[in-house]
């Protein structure tokens, strides 16, 4: 019997990096996500096939049950396979029945966004596997990729959330976030996928007075969530960028790439890649395309 699971993609609007240390973060689930399709098979093997948004296969492998149980590592040419085995091994530790009570599987994943966009290829997979095996997605994340877990909260919720780690445990507050100026908000892909692991490692080196930073970011998150006027929203985004620029000792993305932009641009997630948020009075699509940034998505097409 075929079983299908689905998880939403994510965008982190506020609290990037500092969410790891307990700051409040505003996160939005996207209209894009990933399916996981499970079918029975034989020979104690998993035949795994992963499709990109355009129907092309980006990963295909056969994994013996024994490799999962033993957490076998293949050579460095099999990076994706090794990562998948690691996730499935940790899942097996949490619920072994998918190995002990099965003959084999044909497993398919289907992204509804290009995998290089950074909207949560890994988090949607972790959450889908957790749904399938009825295990705690946050525990599976902790044992495999690590991270704050806000992306899993987006995978599981269909509305905006305030996400916070309290005593290292995830707390999720569903909120209504739909300001009346969403037609002025766009998401722009920066033409490169950021490695969030290395970005986080760099942040951990530079934290400084983290309690003071958390207090500032929490206040800004509240301002952004409650902004009624676009200028208040834009000003709060700007304040967030300045604060994180000081923490990370990096230029803001607007200073580095778009210093003549008429509006405000904010980095999202790991700085230096993936998407940025842009707010402006006029449609900025032509501005970004002239500079080689072809993927400009209006808020209404991106956010659930």
Image: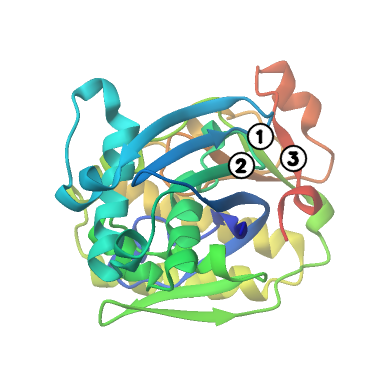
Along the viewing direction, whichever of 68 and 8 lies nearer the viewer: 68
Going from N to C along the chain, the mark reached first, 2 or 1, is: 1
Quarter containing the C terminus: bottom right
Could you tell me how far apart the alpha carbons at marks 2 and 3 are, in whole angstroms? 17 Å
- Percent x, y for residue 238? 55, 52
Residue sitting at 70 percent across and 77 percent down?
176
Residue assigned mark 1:
53
83 left or right, relative to 186: left
**Residue 7 visible, this angle:** yes
Which is in the foreground here, disc 2 or disc 3? 2
- Percent x, y for residue 243? 40, 55
Give the answer, above or below, for where 232 lies relative to 275.
Answer: below
Give the answer, above or below, for where 179 lies relative to 171.
Answer: above
3 left or right, relative to 273: right
- Percent x, y for residue 293? 65, 23
Residue sitting at 61 percent across and 33 percent down?
114
SS assignment at label 1: loop
**Residue 201 visible, this angle:** no
Could you tell me how far apart the alpha carbons at marks 2 and 1 are, in whole angstroms? 5 Å
Q: Is there CB contact under 8 Å for labels 2 and 1?
A: yes
Give the answer, above or below, for where 270 lies relative to 79.
Answer: below
Could you tell me how far apart the alpha carbons at marks 3 and 1 are, in whole angstroms? 16 Å
Going from N to C along the chain, the mark reached first, 3 or 1, is: 1
Residue assigned mark 3:
297
SS assignment at label 3: strand
Q: Is there CB contact under 8 Å for labels 2 and 3?
A: no
Q: For residue 57, which quarter of the picture?
A: top right
Residue 111 image label = 2
Residue sitting at 33 percent across and 61 percent down?
141
């Amino acid at each position: 019997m075929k079983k299908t699971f689905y998880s939403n993609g994510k965008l982190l609007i506020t609290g990037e990096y500092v969410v790891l240390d307990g700051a409040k973060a505003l996160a939005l689930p996207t209209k894009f996500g990933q399916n996981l399709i499970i079918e029975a098979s034989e020979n104690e093997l998993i035949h795994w096939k992963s499709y990109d948004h355009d129907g092309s296969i980006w990963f295909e492998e056969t994994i013996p049950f024994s490799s999962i149980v033993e957490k076998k590592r293949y050579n460095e040419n099999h990076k994706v396979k090794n990562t998948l085995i690691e996730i499935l091994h940790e899942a097996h530790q949490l619920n072994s029945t998918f190995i002990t009570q099965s003959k084999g599987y044909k497993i398919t994943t289907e992204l509804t966004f290009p995998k290089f966009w950074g909207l949560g290829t890994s988090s949607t997979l972790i959450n889908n596997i957790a749904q399938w095996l009825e295990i705690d997605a946050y525990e599976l994340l902790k044992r495999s990729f690590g991270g704050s877990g806000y992306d899993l909260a987006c995978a599981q919720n269909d509305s905006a959330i305030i996400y916070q780690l309290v005593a290292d445990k995830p707390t999720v507050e569903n909120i209504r976030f739909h300001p009346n100026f969403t037609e002025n908000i766009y998401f722009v892909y920066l033409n490169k996928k950021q490695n969030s692991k290395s970005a986080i490692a760099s942040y951990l080196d530079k934290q400084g007075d983290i309690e003071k930073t958390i207090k500032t970011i929490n206040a800004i998150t509240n301002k952004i969530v409650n902004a009624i006027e676009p200028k208040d929203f834009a000003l709060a985004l700007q304040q967030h960028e300045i604060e994180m620029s000081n923490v990370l000792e990096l230029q803001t993305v607007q200073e580095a790439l778009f210093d003549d932009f008429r509006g405000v641009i904010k980095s999202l997630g790991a700085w230096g890649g993936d998407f940025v948020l842009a707010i402006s009075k006029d449609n900025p699509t032509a501005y970004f395309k002239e500079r080689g940034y072809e993927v400009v998505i209006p808020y209404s097409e991106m956010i659930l």
